[in-house]
Amino acid sequence: MAAALVSAAAVGVAQGPAPAGPGVGVPQGRQSEGAIQNRPGADRTIELPIPNIREYKPKSTLVVPEHPVPRAKYPVIDIHTHQPAPISADQFDRVVASMDPLHLQVLVNVTGSSGDRLVQAIAALKASKHRDRMVQFTNINFQGVGPGWAAKAVAQLEADAKAGALGIGEINKGFGLTARKADGTRLKLDDPDLDPVWQAAARLNLPVLIHTADPQEFFQPISMTNERWLELALYPDRRFPSPQYPSFDEVMGERDRLFKRNPKTIFIAAHMGWHANNLARLGKMFDEMPNVYGEVGAVLYDLGRQPRTAREFFIKYQDRILFGKDSYQPDEFPYYWRVFETADEYFDYYRDYHAFWKLYGLALPDDVLRKLYYRNALKLVPGIPRSGFPR
């Protein structure tokens, strides 16, 4: 399959249509309009074995300044981490030992817990010598939405908040894609039956971390032009073909209506709402929905390939973006610090199936870094311990 991928791509370059005009960003054809001869290489065929897509790792000869950043410049709150809930003393010791060298000050555990499990999770944190290094969110059980569901969900949310939950989430992508109502129909994100829960979140001052859908490429055919081909080949459960699933834009439309209909509820769009590849769209959301924030977990590959656009975006919307990582792999955090803090060029990303391209630094100003790393999170989640942060 991989050989076919590369071979088909090569054929596409050799036999694709000619550009419509000068400067038009379409695949090059064999010959430019007005040229007498074909492009160099247009008539050649590959004479060597085609490498597997995961084996071809060209080593760059580019020589540019390098400034690895093993430790963040300021203390960091990770608004999107997944840890055991409850976490054992030994597990917590191990996690904190890895946090300190990175300058991670507080983790917000969004491994959703509710009821008795939430009580146990918070008790474990309070009993720990690291009690100021992690806080816990609760979650919502969307099974059986219909008559009588909202009252029970609100009561549980109130109990969880009283037990010490500081927010809601991570509401995962199944909400909007696979979750069903009691009558068997798909549970849409903007279903009015859910409104009492969002209103309760606002009343209880619980921000909602919500992961809606997935990257838009996951809803497209697995073709030779899909830039997430490798990830889709590795993970069948990340494919959302039509008509089995609603389209990307359909789900995002429901999400936007949800956000607009609940202006008093704070929503944190996980993974920058999956619009890091289209920051103009995300900026429009921020402009129209002052109750919406974004976090950067698992989208560094998009931010780091558009350093000028992303830098301008982070400066303009510096009060609306939080740091989040999602998967807790300590050796991956320094890639984030390097993108955000330096102006380095053309350096590796940490996961091949997310991106086959290189990253560039945004060199964010210090005031923006402080807000990204900890100030915005402290503003949205007042219960986060303040110790360890600059005054």
Image: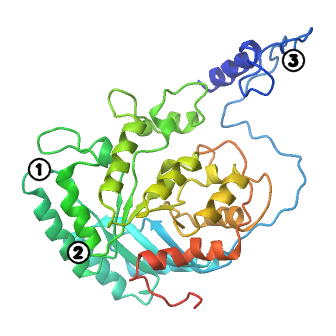
First of labels 3, 1 by sequence position: 3
Q: Furthest residue to the front?
A: 288
Q: Secondary structure at mark 2?
A: helix
Residue at (45% x, 34% y) in the render = 219
The disc, 2 or 1, on the residue closer to the chain's N-terminal end is 1
Left or right: residue 344 compared with residue 105: right
For mark 3, what is the residue?
41
Q: Is residue 336 above or below residue 216?
A: below
Judge whether residue 288 can be spotted in this image: yes
Q: CA distance from mark 2 to mark 1?
A: 22 Å
Assess whether mark 3 and mark 2 are in contact (beta carbons under 8 angstroms): no
Amino acid tagged 1: Gly
Position of 153 compared to 172: left or right?
A: left
Q: Amino acid at mark 2?
A: Asp
Q: Quadrant of the C terminus?
A: bottom right
Residue 77: image location, x then y, percent: 52, 75
Q: Residue at x 7, y 52 (%)?
A: 147
Q: Position of residue 69 (x, y in %)?
A: 73, 70
For the question of whether residue 271 can be seen, the reply is no
Task: Tell me, yes or no, whether the two marked residues, 3 and 1, touch with CB atoms within 8 Å.
Answer: no
Question: On the rendered structure, is 94 left or right of 69?
Answer: left
For marks 2 and 3, give the CA distance: 65 Å
Report helix, strand or loop for mark 1: loop
Instruction: Give the residue type at disc 3.
Output: Gly
**In the rendering, which numbered label is found on residue 146?**
1
- Name the image quarter holding residue 194: bottom left
Taking the image as shown, residue 170 lies to the left or right of residue 377, namely left
Camera-nearest label, 2 or 1: 1
Residue drawn at (42%, 38%), measured in percent from left and top? 248
**Image height of 54 relative to 131, above or below:** above
- Residue occupied by mark 2: 160
